[in-house]
Amino acid sequence: MQQNKTSILCKYKDESLNKRYGLIHIEVNKALRMQHEGTIDIIDKTIDILKVDTHYNKNTTQTVNKKYILKKKVAWIQDNSKEGGAEKSNKFLREKGNDFGFEINLVTPNDFNITHLNNCDLLIINNFYEFEIDQMNKIYNLIYEDRKLYVKYDHDHREASRPHISQQLFAMSKLNVFISPKHKELFMNSLGSQLEENSIILPLAIDTTKYINKNSNREKNSVLVPCLRKCNSNFKNFIEKHINDKFYIIGDYDYHGSNIKKLSNQNDDGMIRLYNMCETVYHEPDTFWAGERIYFEALLCGCKVICNENVGHISWNFEINVLKEKLDNAILIFWSKIDEIIKRI
């Protein structure tokens, strides 16, 4: 989406001039020339200066074939009380979006910036149950009254339990994004098959450059239990049948024995180390979860995964040899879809 812009925000490199004049707006071509000469820095983050097919003509002191484009502005609406799997995936997806040339501003209950909402080209509405009533009303007014362009990107199934609110929310969005076939099926059954036309399914965003199989010599009969709080009831039966295995359980739970080691909560690097140390990952949730990135992370790192159909990502039926490609492509597809929607404006 190429746009014309007459001036851009700059600052002098010379500290004395910078203190005297502060930030200044300079006509675009002049600013490009001055930046090339080394007298100013362009600090306007709403444009990308393209480096292809450009050069500076010293004889005419003009920039030739220099192009600039206005970044597409996206307001990403999301709860922020915790950083679970969905939040980690969203953070990585936003980082990739910034790399692809979008300007993405996170809007949370604690940082509710109405300017970001008003000035964006498109809203991405993720999980937003923790917003204050007046905050949610402002979002609803934007999408229903002002007809602000938006996409509903869902990570769980709570919206399916309140169809009196969700049916309109999903029906009016330009695109509904679900994270597994089972996840989408649940919403179709709850909100109606009419949503099929403007809905797609993409797995959670995962950085496949980090989750890699680095170990062919794993601890024999070792089982990692990364999220026991979701599968405590099922795990009681499992551990009784596998008394000869060694269990690494993350979190403080009431399980004791010489074959059990309790671990504190882990950061990403810690999880990757554990995935590469253990033979098996156990994750059989007691209730349904839309995706579960644990499943894909463990497979990417070479683990055998024991799980059940309550892991939504099971319904993808991905072969392990194409898993990385599928996950990488999902990120490209997501931002390509967002780009297409904005270009229709």
Image: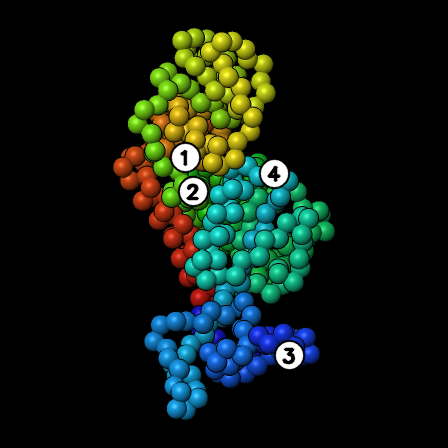
Mark before the other along the chain sequence, 4 or 1: 4
**Label disc, if present, on residue 82 of the rendered structure:** 4
**Coordinates of residue 182 in the picture (x, y in percent):** 42, 35
Instruction: State the residue lying farthest toward the bottom.
Output: 60
> Eyeballing the image, is 189 above or below 333?
above
Question: Identity of the amino acid at label 1?
Answer: Glu
**Label disc, if present, on residue 297 of the rendered structure:** 1
Question: Identity of the amino acid at label 3?
Answer: Leu
> Eyeballing the image, is 135 above or below 102?
above
Nearer mark to the viewer, of 3 and 1:
3
Mark before the other along the chain sequence, 1 or 2: 2
> Eyeballing the image, is 266 above or below 136?
above
Residue 278 appears anywhere in the view = yes
* Front residue (pair 254, 204): 254
Q: Secondary structure at mark 2?
A: loop
Question: Identity of the amino acid at label 4?
Answer: Lys
User: Quarter of the image containing the N terminus?
Assistant: bottom left
Q: Residue at x 37, y 79 (%)?
A: 55
Disc 3 to disc 4, C-alpha distance: 45 Å
Disc 4 to disc 2, C-alpha distance: 18 Å
Question: Identity of the amino acid at label 2?
Answer: Ile
Q: Secondary structure at mark 1?
A: helix
**Coordinates of residue 66 in the picture (x, y in percent):** 41, 79
Confirm or deny contact between disc 1 and disc 2 (CB under 8 A): yes
Mark before the other along the chain sequence, 3 or 4: 3
Question: Within 10 Å of the Cα at label 2, are there few (<14), some (14-19), or many (20+) other Cα atoms?
Answer: many
Disc 3 to disc 2, C-alpha distance: 46 Å
